[in-house]
Amino acid sequence: MSDQKLATVAVRTGIDSDTQYNAVVPPLYLTSTYSFPQLGEVPTYDYSRSGNPTRNTLADALSTLEGGAGGVVTNCGTAAMNLLVSALLGPDDLIVAPHDCYGGTYRLFDTRAKKGDFKVCFVDQTDPQALADAFAQQPKLVWVETPSNPLLRIVDIAELCAAAHQAGALVAVDNTFLSPILQQPLALGADFVVHSTTKYINGHSDVLGGVLIAKTEAHAETLAWWANCIGATGAPFDAYLTLRGLRTLAPRMRMHEENSAKILAYLQQQPLVGTIYHPSQPEHPGHDIALKQQKGFGAMLSFEINGSMAQLETFVRELKCFSLAESLGGTESLICHPSSMTHRAMSDEAQAEAGLKTTLLRLSVGLEDPDDLIADLAQAFALAAKEAV
Ligand SMILES: *Cc1c(COP(=O)(O)O)cnc(C)c1O
């Protein structure tokens, strides 16, 4: 299976695996428990917190797509992150995380560190000196999010992994923004990959889910043990829906990227658009690294409104094809104001330090016809331009 192309793995996962009725699509096992054949004979599955065929099919598919030894499907992306730090870190252990990571990641690490569960140090991972100083403190784990949210900063995964391993640290990469179709961190040296499958992998904005994939068998076993211990595993029905979404991941990513390239070209012409953040832009820091380590630039983009907050509000309010909502990676287009939405858990100082301005907007470009998306942006910009500055 692993020598197949990614699109084929995604489509054919679990197909023809039913031995009872030869169902083409794998059945959904909603059971919480399983009968023992007889006293003293433990079946393959005994209780769905520890194992479930539907969930395991999804875990195996995602692990294969990322080139891992095994993975755990969790009830959300945050649970996958929490599983990793619970399994790996003790009170004296340090995790180095990016200062501009996903808001919920920041909240999780910051809150648990304040409680004394482990130590955390947030750094600008694109600053070699800051990174070297952090590595000098001998971290146990380095957290990477590339492209980062919401500024699409790029970290050189191979280079960072080499330095982290030299310092004795393990590396986990949050690959939510690109999916395994566009980036495979384990092949670049990472030890773990995390996804919020809520986003592109499920792709239809109707399921919360996560996955944590390990490169080695030993780590995969440890994580499976901990997932059962702390109750982090996902529901079978959610896994079934996510498997359904996964089958179209490759063509969806291609279309998301095509639409976002058209929108980028349009945004570049707009007087109300300030700095655009997307790795495809030659002036974007990390453009060359993205070219090297990504198989595409991805469909998430951010830009600053070159105008007043009143103009920003009008623009967002008048949009019809972009829903004002958190999250990303669904078939429908979304717009988000990170400083008051996804990143509101960060203090104003932390936001400023991360370079996150109040004029920043983030787009998750969906699969609508790009002409309609551009026409919608155009009418909202026209109304915003009339707004008194
Ligand atoms: C959404 C998201 C998460 C958290 O995942 P949930 O499924 O919402 O718990 C983590 N990292 C990134 C980059 C995300 O976008």
Image: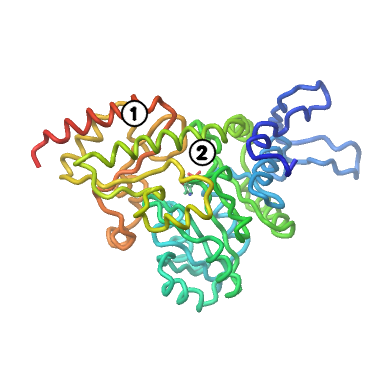
Callout 2: helix, strand or loop? loop
> Quick one: quadrant of the N terminus?
top right
Seen at 48% across and 62% down, the residue is 112
- 307 relative position to 56: left or right: left
Seen at 26% across and 47% down, the residue is 304
Query: Residue 23: percent from the left, percent from the top?
Result: 76, 22
> Which tag, 1 or 2, sits closer to the chain's start?
2
Kind of residue indicated by mark 1: Leu
Query: Residue 310: percent from the left, percent from the top?
Result: 15, 40
> Quick one: quadrant of the C terminus?
top left
Crowd rating for badge 1 (residues with CA inside 10 Å; few <14, some 14–19, many 20+) = many
Query: Residue 150: percent from the left, percent from the top?
Result: 37, 50
Give above or below for 117 relative to 82: below
Query: Residue 128: percent from the left, percent from the top?
Result: 43, 71
Give above or below for 247 relative to 96: above
Q: CA distance from mark 1 to mark 2?
A: 19 Å
Q: Which residue lies under the disc numbered 1?
A: 373
Q: Which residue is the extreme one toward the left?
A: 388
Residue 79: which numbered mark, if any? none
Instruction: Please tell me in which quadrant of the rendered image residue 250 appears.
Output: top right
Mark 2: is the Cβ under 8 angstroms from ligand 1?
no
Crowd rating for badge 2 (residues with CA inside 10 Å; few <14, some 14–19, many 20+) = many
Q: Which residue lies under the disc numbered 2?
A: 200
Seen at 43% across and 40% down, the residue is 299
- 305 relative position to 82: left or right: left
Seen at 18% across and 44% down, the residue is 309
Callout 1: helix, strand or loop? helix
Instruction: Please tell me in which quadrant of the rendered image residue 60 appears.
Output: top right
Front residue of 351/303: it is 303
